Image: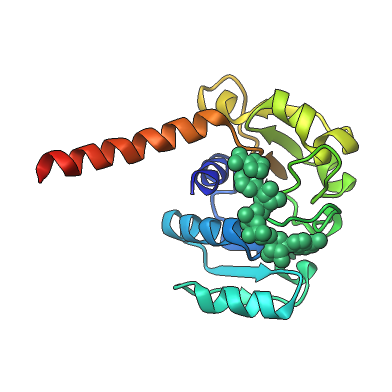
Amino acid sequence: MRTAAVSAISAKLLMSPGAEVLAILGTGKQALSHYNVFTEIFSFKEVRVWSQTKERVERFVRSVEGPVRGCSSAEEAVRGADVIVTVTRSTEPVLYGQWVKAGAHVAAVGACRPDWRELDDMLMKSAVVYADSREGALSESGDVILSGAEVFAELGDVINGTKSAQREKTTVFKSLGMGVEDAVSAKLVFDQWTAKATKS
Ligand SMILES: NC(=O)C1=CN([C@@H]2O[C@H](COP(=O)(O)OP(=O)(O)OC[C@H]3O[C@@H](n4cnc5c(N)ncnc54)[C@H](O)[C@@H]3O)[C@@H](O)[C@H]2O)C=CC1
Ligand SMILES: O=C([O-])C1=[NH+]CCC1
């Protein structure tokens, strides 16, 4: 859930204000938590999902409570989408720059190893790239390292106002996960548990 929460912060800061279509590539655990968080926080008119097999797409569509359209290709899912979440275990690109609408926001969550890819070079080089941690992205993200793309800013730089949120451009948020996110999540759970325990 904390990974999806961070992706939602990236979308809040970087997606175009009139975003209507969300596409999710992947149908595993992260896909489900991203679906739940993004549909809870935002009001997309359409949500699309794609995965490697038809069976996985159908299982995902059955498992969620809200509407979602299963797609038979990644291209079909992402063409025209305003926000794209990549949550696969792929080691090769599944999302190509030529399919991505100008001004779209991509939350790139998979490919967390230096030789793994989810996004192609065209997308990485044409987008404004943000990361949770610049240091992490430069040592762990195949999409950043192998494309040679520049990391424009950390998400924290945008939150504290030292770097701009370039919403009008195509943006990529490269998520790798940080210990501080786990610590904050653990504190939230602990605080809620303590509050409940004190009431009873
Ligand atoms: N950035 C972050 O903070 C975090 C990143 N991750 C990463 O997110 C990714 C997804 O994690 P989970 O949902 O837990 O995994 P999962 O195993 O539950 O789901 C993986 C999904 O990827 C799809 N997939 C696998 N190989 C593929 C390929 N070659 N092409 C297209 N789709 C493929 C599967 O069909 C499945 O839908 C993993 O790469 C994981 O390492 C996970 C947790 C935190
Ligand atoms: O932060 C995290 O838990 C992970 N990041 C990459 C795989 C798992």
> Where 119 falls versus 29 (above or below)?
above
Asked which colour scheme the image uses, the reply is rainbow
Count the numbered circles shown. 0
Asked whether the viewer can see residue 84, the reply is: no
Q: Ligand 2 lies in which image quarter?
A: top right
Looking at the rendering, which quadrant does residue 25 occupy?
bottom right
Above or below 62: residue 16: above
Q: Residue at x 75, y 72 (%)?
A: 76
Residue 153 position, x and y percent, is 67, 26
Q: Where in the figure is residue 88, as x and y percent of width and height?
A: 71, 57
With respect to residue 162, does 102 lie above or below?
below
Q: What is the quadrant of residue 46 in the picture?
A: bottom right
- Looking at this view, is 30 or 83 the one in front? 30
Q: Nearer the viewer, residue 9 or 177?
A: 177
Q: Residue at x 58, y 19 (%)?
A: 162
Q: Residue at x 53, y 41 (%)?
A: 6
Find residue 3 and report its horizontal and vertical position in percent.
55, 45
Q: Is residue 127 left or right of residue 154?
A: right
**Horizontal arrangement in the rendering, residue 136 relative to residue 164 (left or right):** right
Image location of residue 57, percent across then percent down: 66, 75
Would residue 157 appear left or right of 192 to someone viewing this image? right
Residue 3 visible in this rendered orientation of the protein: yes
Q: Residue furthest top?
A: 162
Q: Residue at x 50, y 56 (%)?
A: 38
